[in-house]
Image: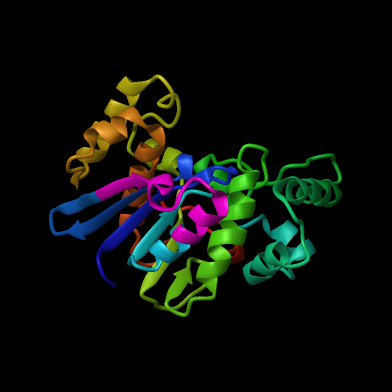
Amino acid sequence: MGSRVLGVDFSGATDAGRSLWLTEARSTGEGLVVDDCYSAADEWGVDRERAHHGLAERAADFSVVGLDFPFSLPQALLDEHCGGTWPGLVDWLTGDGPADPDSFASTCRSTARAYTGDGTAQLRRETDLRRAALCPYDSIVQYQTFHGIRNVLAELADDPDVVVAPMQSGTADTRVVEVYPAATFGWLGLYREGYKGDHRDRRATNLEGIEACSVDIGDFRETYESDHDALDSLAAAVSAGRVGADPPRHGPRQEGHIYV
């Protein structure tokens, strides 16, 4: 496998291009070197569908791609709606399943209540529990999950030169993995939260922590310190750049895995 790495801070908003950021980097003998950082709006415009299509096309140019959104659902929901498999989830969301993020989340909540029998509406995957991540259909991330799978992963999953790990196995030119910047920062002992918005000083601290891990950020210090979405794309690239052999998974393969 080659050495080009793409880290993506994803957005499922209507104007996704504004807050969808990408960091392009390459692995070297000395560590990770950042070559570029930019927003999807700069490349493809603010429209969600254009930005997502552009991202899917761009991703196929890299050896490993880290995308910051949930790739799958808890196994109980896959069993109920998707034949128990991740390809079934892709078919469900691109076919006759929920037509929008709200109906997607509502369906998942109803199924979860029936499954648990105690009124619990939000189920998390094993990897979510291990990485302190939200339920994949939580109101905060339901747009990312729905549109990420439907608009991006569905297109990549059909490409014979791409593997969406760990649900798809085998070798390919491009490996696509789920990442979570908060977990990356936590693994590094940095700020998992509280570094967005007006907290430039905390972003600077997180950036220094990343640099200490043999990451050359090039001329992008101002970009990363001034915009938390840009910084999250760097964290995504750092985790993607660490992906090697398939690590021990937390839970069923079809639920996916957050790579840190």
What percent of the width, then of the height, locates residue 204?
Answer: 28, 27
Residue 174 vertical position relative to residue 181 in the rendered view, above or below: below
Quadrant location, the N terminus: bottom left
**Magenta highlight on residue 44:** yes
Q: Residue at x 30, y 46 (%)?
A: 37
User: In the rendered image, is residue 70 in sight?
Assistant: no
Total number of numbered labels?
Answer: 0
Q: Residue at x 23, y 39 (%)?
A: 220
What percent of the width, then of the height, locates residue 22?
Answer: 37, 49
Q: Nearer the viewer, residue 244 or 14?
A: 14
Instruction: State the residue lying farthest toward the left.
Output: 30
What percent of the width, then of the height, locates residue 217?
Answer: 21, 42
Q: Quadrant of residue 55?
A: bottom left
Q: Main secondary structure of the magenta part?
A: helix
User: In the rendered image, is residue 232 in sight?
Assistant: yes
**Magenta highlight on residue 144:** no
Q: Is residue 197 left or right of residue 92?
A: left
Q: Nearer the viewer, residue 208 or 40?
A: 40
Q: Is residue 145 left or right of residue 206?
A: right
Q: Quadrant of residue 186?
A: top left
What percent of the width, then of the height, locates residue 20?
Answer: 45, 45
Which span of residues is magenta-colored?
A: 36-54
User: What kind of colouring is applied to the model shown?
Assistant: rainbow
